[in-house]
Amino acid sequence: MPRRTLSPAASLATLISILSLLPLAFVVFVTIQTGWTAAAAMIFRPRVFELLVNTVLLVALTVPICIALAVALAFLTERSDLPGARIWSFLAVAPLAVPAFVQSYAWVSLLPRLHGLAAGVLVSVLAYFPFLYLPVAATMRRLDPALEEAAAAIGDPPARVFRRIVLPQLRLAILGGSLLVGLHLLAEYGLFAMIRFDTFTTAIVEQFQSTFNGPAANMLAGVLVVFCLLLLALEAALRGRERYARVGSGAAMAPRRVRLGRTMPLFLMLPVSVTALALGVPGVTLGSWLAAGGLDIWKFDAIGRSLGQTLFLAIAGAALATLLALPMAWIAIRRPGRLQRLLEACNYVTGSLPGVVVALALVTITVRVALPLYQTFVTILAAYALMFLPRALVSLRASIAQAPVELEQAAASLGRSRANAFFSVTLRLAAPGVASSMALASLGIFNELPGTQMLAPNGTRTLAMAFWALSSELDYAAAAPYALIMVVVSLPLAWLLHVQSRRSAGR
Amino acid sequence: MTPPLYSFASAAAFALGLALTSSAALAANATVTPSAEGIIVYNAQHESLAEAWAAAFTAETGIKVTLRNAGDTEFANQLVQEGAASPADVFLTENSPAMALVDAAGLFAPLDKETLALVPENFRPADGKWTGIAARSTVFAYDKTKLAADKLPKSLLDLADPSWKGRWAASPSGADFQAIVGALLQLKGEEATAAWLKAMKENFTAYKGNSTAMKAVNAGQVEGAVIYHYYWFGDQAKTGENSKNVALHYFRHQDPGAFVSVSGGGVLASSKHPDEAQAFVKWVVGKGGQEILKTGTSFEYAVGNGADSNPKLEPLAKLDAPKVEQSTLDSKKVTDLMTAAGLL
């Protein structure tokens, strides 16, 4: 049934995609406006080279360590008889509830000398490896053991089976997770500012603070954007076109768990030490600051106000991101094609832009062109929606795919309008996906810092802003309650993601 | 969820309130009638100090104050971008260059004569568009367990010497340090400043924030740091945990390193509540505001006529500061030079 006109969903999705390209278009526009000579002078200078080296080393060291850690932990929790595997599995996801800058605050107050590349790698691994663990563990849980058994039957030793059979099947999960970790590394500000490691993002924020959207900040942003696009392209190139689905009839059988036997205590050391570093250190540091601060640090009116504002922004922003992702998710499943792939690419590009770049663009656009929107909730919510739309898209798409199209068609044939059929049938079935979209997006908003500082309406003070202000005045004790609340509110979200990833794996 | 919804509602009521309050403000000449929405202060001063000022002012006058917090230069450039459409009523800074930038763009309204009369002439620009509200002295905070008094730098310029390589720290992204560079630029000229910054890039270690730099001195990571005086006094007044090994060296002798920076306050010409805004700045430089400097925990110098600073501080008169025209410190030139030196 060829169609000449776009369906309402497709038109909506197109419109949203065009809007989402606004920040990128802005960076290009500023670069052109600055003129090539002036831009080149600001891009090709020693400082940019320094930042380039720092950023490349950071990504090149952190991502492989995260992969190794995630694969090892996933193997232990999913495919071995490690005692307490389910608990370790949750504890491997739980660091997501500790905002990255709280993680580095914990480390810096424990080891004040910690700084530079090594510190950057250490703290980023602890903060971000769960982004790899989640997909890798989910895939490992789903693998059909028949292939492995076939390999074992022809005499391959277990290590070789793992390398030749299991690892290749994890490729998509590893690539997707690595991309997520890499993009987070490029976008992160608070973590690296706290341990004195300069990346493009910290330098952009500093330039912004010295000049407010000066050309220098925008040129740095341009280089950072190129970096993000390179990561996206690299991931797409490595992904390749192989099939990963199981062929043939019948259900996959449950994988057998490897018996660790006597070496078990040795293997147990891994999840124990990772948990101690990623959760124990923040726990102990926070605890000691809370104890040292006593009751004085609990300024309930200020904390309550921050919590209220943060919840409002997180829920409203996540709802908006999810709503905007709906048309995109729907056409991705129901009307896949060239247009849909193009739109999706647009959204990934925007989602890969660091919050700083999006905020930098929105500040200038609203102050110059759309002044009534300047410093309003509309702008900050729009920024959140742009930043976190891809997160919402991923789980929405997966859950819409699981809602049978026949039910939607049946509802339509019984006289419901298309939109009504979608909302009353498909979306209801996809509700768990909607919930995890919102959880993922609001988790991001909860921990967002530089964008919020630049765009928020007057009088806004989110938990992250308050924590940052106090900890940069070295008032670590007064900052502790804010950190604690951020962790406590994020924990159920991390739990939800853990449960959701198990469910999507069918158990 | 009430607070954000409330601010939503107040934002929605903004247009309505505008019409009502502007007529109310006209009616009230002698004393200012508080409006429903109060004033918005772009605050680059220490948050705790500004909060103390705002709370005491609101308690006395009933005028509501909303603070937006960020740094000197960020706000100054932001105000220039916003122009007449700025939502801000009052601008408070830690240093003068940011005030000079906004003044040069013609965005300040003249301050009330009575306000200006409260501050000596050397702490405010001749054009009367803004005023000093507090002051701070440059110091070399050093590790007294490592550096003997005779090994201290005689001048700020000495820190460019290769013998100081790897031994000192600063926070180059902060407006505080940029004000010091501004003074250096005014006193020694562009060429000398550029050369000094180039040597600095070689010699120094960058920290984010003056308190972090002082903490590094205390922890023995560097021997000294160029910061302002009050970080040390503030820490001493609390636990002393970040400054127990640290002592302060005042350069004196009108050295660029003895620069005393003036914090500024001004009312925006575009303010929708000019009377309330004027009242706030007047209050800050008046008895109430300056008393908070003396008795509070900010440890900045009071600048009002006859106002005393905290007795623990080295008296302003004894600092032998260089003569610097605060109202023409050039923040734009400073960030350009620092960017060129690879510091930003």
Image: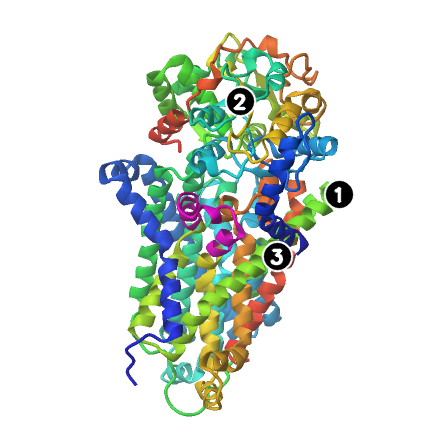
Looking at the image, is B239 positioned above or below residue A26?
Answer: above
Nearer to us in this view, B46 or A273: B46
Are both tags, 2 and 1, on one chain?
Answer: no
Looking at the image, is B295 positioned above or below residue A497?
Answer: above
Q: Residue furthest left?
A: A37
Q: Label 2 amino acid?
A: Pro
Say which residue appears at 59% left-offset and 40% top-offset: A469
Measured in 3D between alpha carbons, the distance from the residue under mark 2 to the one under mark 3, in whole angstroms, is: 42 Å
| Badge 3: residue crowd in 10 Å (few <14, some 14–19, many ≥20) | many
Q: Which numbered dot is residue A294?
A: 1
Q: Label 1 amino acid?
A: Gly
Query: Of tags 2 and 3, which is closer to the observer?
Result: 2
Label 3: state its secondary structure.
Answer: helix
Label 1: state its secondary structure.
Answer: helix
Q: Which numbered dot is residue A311?
A: 3
Measured in 3D between alpha carbons, the distance from the residue under mark 2 to the one under mark 1, in whole angstroms, is: 47 Å
Say which residue appears at 28% left-offset and 82% top-offset: A2
Q: Is residue B328 left or right of residue B112?
A: left
Say which residue appears at 53% left-offset and 52% top-offset: A377
What percent of the width, then of the height, locates residue A291?
73, 45
- Indicate the chain on which mark 2 is placed: B
Residue at which label 2 appears: B110
Of the numbered discs 3 and 1, the one sitting upstream in the chain is 1
Please give the range of residues in magenta: A356-383
Q: Label 3 amino acid?
A: Leu
Looking at the image, is A6 positioned above or below residue A18?
Answer: below
Nearer to us in this view, B38 or A249: B38
